[in-house]
Amino acid sequence: MAQCENTEANPTCADPAMSCFILDDTAVTACVPPCDPLAPVCAAGSTCVLAEANDQSPVCVPLELDLPRPA
């Protein structure tokens, strides 16, 4: 999994098809695939959440992070 690049104020991913996800108050940053929160299609073992990075876009993140899941 690629890490976010650029600055903390403007995180980006080298792959434009990916979105930067930053876990609150941690050093966890990762480039992950985007998703539609109304019809999430994420890989097995992932869930759709809002990213804390530049555009607050929804992204697929691993369930191991124990983030709240959409209803």
Image: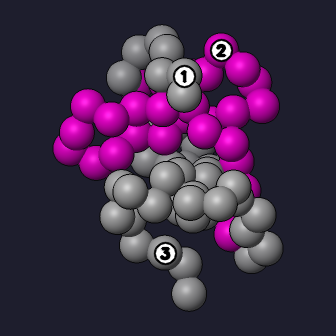
Q: Secondary structure at mark 2?
A: loop
SS under mark 1: loop
**Toward the viewer: 43 or 52?**
43
The answer to which of 61 and 4 lies nearer the viewer is 61
Real-space Cα separation, disc 3 to disc 1, in angstroms: 23 Å
Alpha-carbon span between mark 2 and mark 3: 27 Å
Judge whether residue 14 is colored magenta. Answer: yes
Residue drawn 57% across the image and 59% down it: 46
The earlier-in-sequence mark between 2 and 1 is 1
Instruction: Find disc 2 in the rendering and name its residue.
Output: 14
Q: Horizontal and vertical percent for residue 60?
A: 61, 53
Q: Residue at x 40, y 25 (%)?
A: 9
The residue segment tinted magenta is 9-37
Q: Which residue is mark 3?
A: 69
User: Which residue sits at x=76%, y=64%?
Assistant: 41
Crowding at mark 2 (Cα within 10 Å: few <14, some 14-19, many 20+): some
User: In the rendered image, which residue does mark 1 sit on?
Assistant: 2
Taking 12 as reference, is 59 above or below it? Answer: below
CB of mark 2 within 8 Å of CB of mark 3? no
| Residue type at numbered disc 3 | Arg
SS at badge 3: loop
| Quarter of the rendering containing residue 44 | bottom right
**Image location (x, y in percent) of residue 1:** 54, 28
Q: Position of residue 39 (x, y in %)?
A: 79, 73
Q: Is 1 displayed left or right of 34 in the figure? A: left
